[in-house]
Image: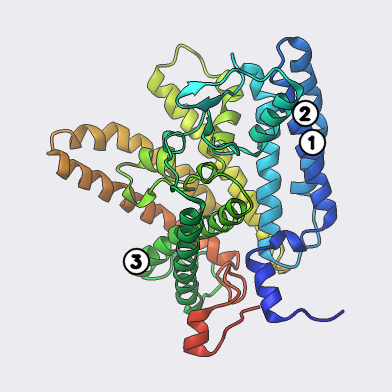
Amino acid sequence: MDTPSPVVAALKHFFLPSTVIPPSVNQLNNNVALCIILSCVSLTYKGRVPSAFRVALFFPAAYYSYYTVCKDHDVPNRIASSAITFGGSLLAFKAFDICIVSLFDREPPHWVKNGKLVPLPETLVGRVAYAVDLFFSFRGSSWFGGYSWDWAPKYIAAYSPPKSRISHISRGVLTFLAYYLALDACETFAQQEKWDLSQAHPVLTLPLSKQLLFSLFIATNTFIVIQINYIFISVVCVMMGSSPSSWPPMFNRPFTSKSLQDFWSNRWHHYFKRAFERASIPAMVLVPQSWSPAVRRVTRAIIIFGFSTVYHLYLVQRNFSVRNWETKWQFVDSSTLLFFLLQPVGLLIERALLVPLSRSLPETSQTWVTRIWVWGWLLWTGRYWADVWVRSGMWNVGAGHVAWSPIRGVIFNQWFLL
């Protein structure tokens, strides 16, 4: 078999990881998608029979999701492994939401247009369009221009798109290029560090200034990787006829967060936010109603971050297995647990101490105090996630997201990293 050119390999590595995902995995995902779409169609009907139909469809969806997410697949790199785990997990949570959690809802999801709820469709074509749109919506946006879902965050529901397709495309291309260079700079700097992967905590053993720097790099790296992939897809879809209003920003200016609650609830990406929140609903049934609203909110936050913790534990374990090292990764990793489970602790500290104490300050001072708090907390706890990132080999040369590096090409004449 001929070896692909470096250009083709770089394009596949960055833009098209699905081209190296085994067809068997895509077939499993298609089966799960079919179960979810049929369940979404049943949401437009009332009665016990549609509910029982959704519950019945959950079992094959869970079966196929298990084989997608939990079984080993022949993949060439970490990017492909991440894509399988990420996509399979999203579909698994979506199936649980539509098939099971919907039983707790008084009303199914509705479209919103011009600030008003749109009645559920009654024609077959309308029901299918509703189902397909709901299936693809993970953040509350809609494929149909001017529409959103009634559970969409405010910044998505109120999104005002560019006036023309050309504006959306040109802005997207320029933003993509700027982000790509920033990502290349982050990975170039991080990969120049001589990481000692034999240590349990390669980041936490560095001087504090470097720990905080690499913690910032992790946040920036995650932000940029999600952004550029989303921008690339949105530009292609708008070029093919999709409405620009269907592509609100992935993030809501996270670096301007005024509190930890604001960061996690409103500013960070919403790929899994609804999935984790919806999955917490059945668990909250077990929480006594006699508990105060504040205690119930804290309990739910712990449950939601618990789901996030388990997901990220598994994601890292799957990525680690691609390295084919003799050393086995411990699923219950202390650094991952510390980062994610410390977040509800931070929310509790913020609500109990910081918010009451800062109320006596002038509004401008209050904003700066809370912003210093949120970024101090995230950078401090982010050191643990940086440890996980490094130990799992994500900053090894050639293991990052950048496969063609203009920065390393100019400085070191090292254009291709694969």
**Front: mark 3 or 1:** 1
Asked if marks 2 and 1 touch (Cβ < 8 Å), the reply is: yes
Name the amino acid, label 1: Leu
Which disc number belongs to residue 191? Answer: none
Q: Looking at this rendering, what residue extends furthest in the bottom direction?
A: 413
Please name the amino acid that badge 3 sits on. Answer: Leu
Q: Amino acid at mark 2?
A: Leu
Mark number for residue 208? 3
Q: Quadrant of residue 283?
A: top right
> If you read the primary sequence from the N terminus, does the residue marked by circle 3 or circle 1 appear first?
1
Tell me the crowding category of disc 1: few under 14, some 14 to 19, or many 20 or more residues within 10 angstroms, Cα based.
Answer: some
Quarter of the N terminus within the rendering: bottom right
Q: Which label sits in the foreground, 3 or 2? A: 2
The residue at the point 59 percent across, 17 percent down is 119
Q: CA distance from mark 2 to mark 1?
A: 6 Å
411, 286: nearer the viewer: 411
Residue, disc 1: 34
